[in-house]
Amino acid sequence: MSQDSLLSPAVLAQNYERYLVPALFRPWADILLDYAKPQPGDRVLDIACGTGIVARQIARHLGEQGHVAALDLNPAMLAAARSLGDSEGAIVEWHQGSALELPFPDQNFDLVVCQQGLQFFPDQPLALREMHRVLAPHGRVVISVNQSLEHNPLYKAFNAVFTRHAGTPSLAAPFAFGNEAKLQTLLSEAEFSSIRVERVSLPTRFKSADDFVQGTILGSAAVIPGFAQLNAAQREALMQNVLQEMHDVLASYTKETHAFDFSVVATIGHAASQNAP
């Protein structure tokens, strides 16, 4: 595949849906919904929706009277989301836009969710103020962000090997949020109330170690730019070098069935737009 093809937003969206949604973002969506507790008739906003797994899962819980607005800055992600077809339950409307300037009126939603998006926003306090603005009185917000690489040793090992061979940073952005304290502070400064922030560990399964390495490279907007700068022979060599150097680490997570199991540690924060009376 050519450099241009690898960097194509449409190809990245397809790889994201192929590799990362089944192993990571679908299971995380289920956990997010356990915290969000969407109710029939709720008006819900999914920010940084990607290819739409959270929006589609929430729609199933809302009934025909509910409504889901799903927003992403990346038109290729939205195109992939639309191509997956309609969800069961509430209608999902797909919107292109920025989390820093939400294209919705004040007090328009009962629930705002953001799965693994906040760490990428260039102005996180502003994004949270925007979430607060569009929430109805006594509305609620649920946010998940990865904890740092120090809390995710498999990705830390991958990051070190990939960066050494590719010569560019890779997984800094997805794991840049640290621990619970930062999200607690940001939610408080955005004037949310009833704030609870928790560390959550998610058992995660890829089909194989090769699938994990390929998916982490080809499906990640943080990793693919460095990979795509290489020619085909260099990319193949890089993939093999990562697999070889990480052989013992990868083997420790590989089961007799060849499935590849590990845990991802993240922070989930949930809060209300204002205190209950």
Image (cartoon, rainbow, N blue to C red):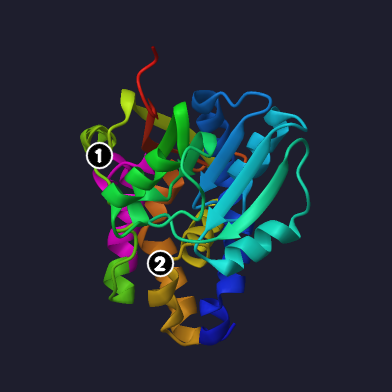
Task: Tell me where residue 85 appears, x and y as whole percent.
Answer: 78, 53
Quadrant housing the C terminus: top left
Q: Earlier in the sequence, mark 1 or mark 2?
A: 1
Quadrant housing the N terminus: bottom right
Front residue of this view, candidates 277 and 15? 277
Q: Is residue 276 placed above or below 243 in the rendered structure?
A: above
Image depth: mark 1 or mark 2 in front:
1
Task: Tell me where residue 93 appears, x and y as whole percent.
Answer: 67, 51
Q: Is residue 113 left or right of residue 185?
A: right
Task: Tell me where residue 152 appears, x and y as whole percent.
Answer: 33, 43
Does the image show residue 22? no
The residue stretch that appears in magenta: 145-162
- SS at mark 2? loop
Does the image show residue 225? yes
Amino acid marked by disc 2: Val
Residue sitting at x 41%, y 57%:
101
Front residue of this view, candidates 152 and 17? 17
Q: Is residue 97 placed above or below 139 in the rendered structure?
A: below
**Please, what is the dominant secondary structure of the magenta stretch?**
helix
Q: Is residue 240 placed above or below 272 in the rendered structure?
A: below
Residue sitting at x 41%, y 75%:
225
Mark number, residue 198: none
Amino acid marked by disc 1: Leu
Q: Residues within 10 Å of mark 2 (few under 14, many from 20)?
A: many
**Residue 164 falls inside the magenta stretch:** no
Q: Which residue is mark 1?
A: 186
Mark number, residue 223: 2
Asked where in the image residue 140 lies, by quadrant, the reply is top left
Residue sitting at x 31%, y 41%:
147
